[in-house]
Image (spheres, rainbow, N blue to C red):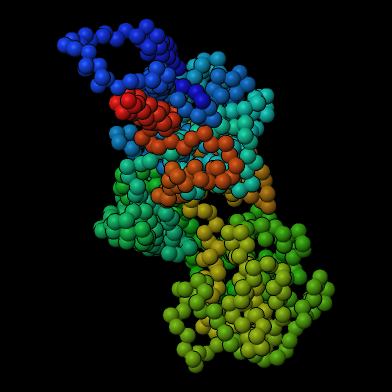
Amino acid sequence: MNFLYPNILWCLFALAIPIIIHLFNFRRHKIVYFSNTATLKTIEQENAKTKKLKYIIALIMRMLFIAALVFAFAYPYNSEQRLKTDDADNLVAVYIDNSMSMHSRSSEISLLEDARASARKIVSNISPSQRFVLLTNSRQPENEYPMNQDEMLMSIDAMQTEASPMSINALYENLQMIMRRNGFKSASLFVYSDFQDNMMNLDGIMADSAIQIVAIPLKSDYQQNIYIDTVWLSLPILQKDFANEINVRVVNESGKEIKGLPVNFEIDGKAVAFNTIDIPANGKNNVSMQFVAEEGSHTATASIDDFPITFDDSYNFMLDVRPIIKIVELSTDNGQSAIQTLFSNDSLFDCKRVDPRRIDQQYLSDCQLIIIDGDDLVNETMMQSIMDLAKEGCSVVMLPSEPLNARNARNAPIISDDTLSISMIAAQHTFFDDIFVSIPDNADLPKVYKHVQIDKKQFHNSLTLISLQNGTSFFTLSKIGAGNVFVFASRFNANWTNFSENSLFVPIMYKIAMLGSQVSRLSYTIGIDKELSINDLTAFSGGDIRIRDVESTFEMIPMVEMRNNRAMIRLFDELPGAGFYNVSNGDEIVATTGWNDSRKESKMKFVDTEEVDKILKNNGLNVITVMRSDDIRSGDVMKTMVRRSTLWKSFIILALISLLIEILVLRFWK
């Protein structure tokens, strides 16, 4: 047992007072006058031994009363609650959750400022000889080396907000690594966080009894949030002077329905559209706005107004308005194909037929749709390059080979000459969303005269969109990365099928082309996306690649890797915040990208104090205490922690009991 105010124990010398009184018996005798000795007959005789025992018990009760009061005022607490903050081999670690959700407010200031102020008090009240580390979500290397008290206080003041929260598991493992690296035998960890549900991951944690944990959950006065979750285009292609539609999903993390919330849409900093939205309580809704953009690359932002959590009130993205969609058909035929007939007369498309033996890899990387007119025409190296392009967002169409060519193919297809009709179309699939309204029972569906068995094992997630009467697949879709691979069981020649002459051919091929047109991504997420893809290799000839914000206040040197005629840009560190960042080669801007903070922080789901204590202890962690959010504003957190002990109440009760016993002994013991 330890005492918060041990100096009060000097008051135990007061125990000498009742001893002195009883030893010297400083009672004043009262003289009673009586007229005759007959009165003495009424005096009860008292046993001398009994009287002595009575006063000894009274003495003990008085001493116990004084001692209990002294112990109570010295504020005793369990020795297990003692932190090893005065041991030379102990490391004092302070984790401050500096994620975006900590911008929520408690009383007059944000949770982050609450945590910062309380952490300063803890560090200031610990011996300057101790060593400290400041753990944050950014995991800055300079903070993870032991610091003295002054360095620790400066690091706390300089701490900035980061978007991505750290799980409890990652925090614990990071501290264990720092202890091993610097030779500390134990650590005292103070955890300041709002304890969002997404950070309470303790799977596989290796508990260490040498790490003492003081958890300090911070609670916001605003347990609600409205945020923009995501943005997408109604049409995958953006064409100059053609109207498109932007869709914005807004989420309401509160128990109150939202009516008429304004949603703004800007392009290149200029307002182009405005709408309002109603959102049910604890629900979400979508709002659409039409726009027309000029050719080129444009910055765009959808935004709302919400307080006090504002980091997720805007969503940044890029609009890449393409003048044309580039299509290449890999074929050795010289005649006019159905593909050429369909796309050649449309100014929206640039369609070329190229011999795969003479193809330029750079030309392939600039295409949005690649059609392989015979799967035996490309070798394994080129096929792998095409699949890598599909992973980046390109659409790929694969047609079977002619029987003459198929004899020498690596996997010669088995061709069936049975004449069949299309029997099933997966009209409920999103691929057909803007193609069909409904399919009549007597619809004129294509006839198939020859077809091959599609090898669904070639792609692990192959899905049949159109099937034949015999149950085999005619048209399949496989999702490969950000792109799609479409496989047909028949060629588009008249001796194989009349599909190219059917009304289904045009909308299906247009849809395939448009799905591959949005090769560049709309936006990226800080803390999740670590890689960018740039098609224009000529822009990287100098090799002086930088990532800068549009105000040129931040600069990063990434790693650049050339892969399949594309530049893959890898980020080693997280960007400082949401916004637009330029990929530059020297002073020349190669591309502009839009970045947003992760929406994991937007969800208002928190673990309460009792649940935090339960989860941590159930995983074997050495939890000293889990404090209430109000405790950090009451002064010294270290003293507040031990004030939660109830041992002082026991001593007060003991003092009252001893006083009561003394009264009863003196009053009723005759």
Query: In which quarter of the view is residue 24 placed?
Result: top left
The percent position of residue 104, horizontal first and vertical second, equals 36, 40
In percent of the image, x 55 and y 84: which residue is there?
502
Residue 254 percent coordinates (x, y): 33, 54
State the residue at coordinates (47%, 27%): 77
Tell me: 212 left or right of 20: right
Can the viewer see residue 115? Answer: no
| Nearest the eye: 199 or 233 | 199
The single residue placed furthest to the left in the displayed view is 35
Q: What residue do we see at 51% from left, 45% from top?
A: 614
Q: Residue furthest right?
A: 408
* Horizontal side of residue 323 vs 620, given as left or right: left
- Along the line of sight, the residue nearer the viewer: 441 or 519: 441
- Seen in the picture, residue 603 relative to 431 is either above or below; the reply is above
Q: Classify residue 108 as left or right of residue 155.
A: left
Compared with 536, 457 (above or below) is below
Q: Does residue 313 appear in this view?
A: yes
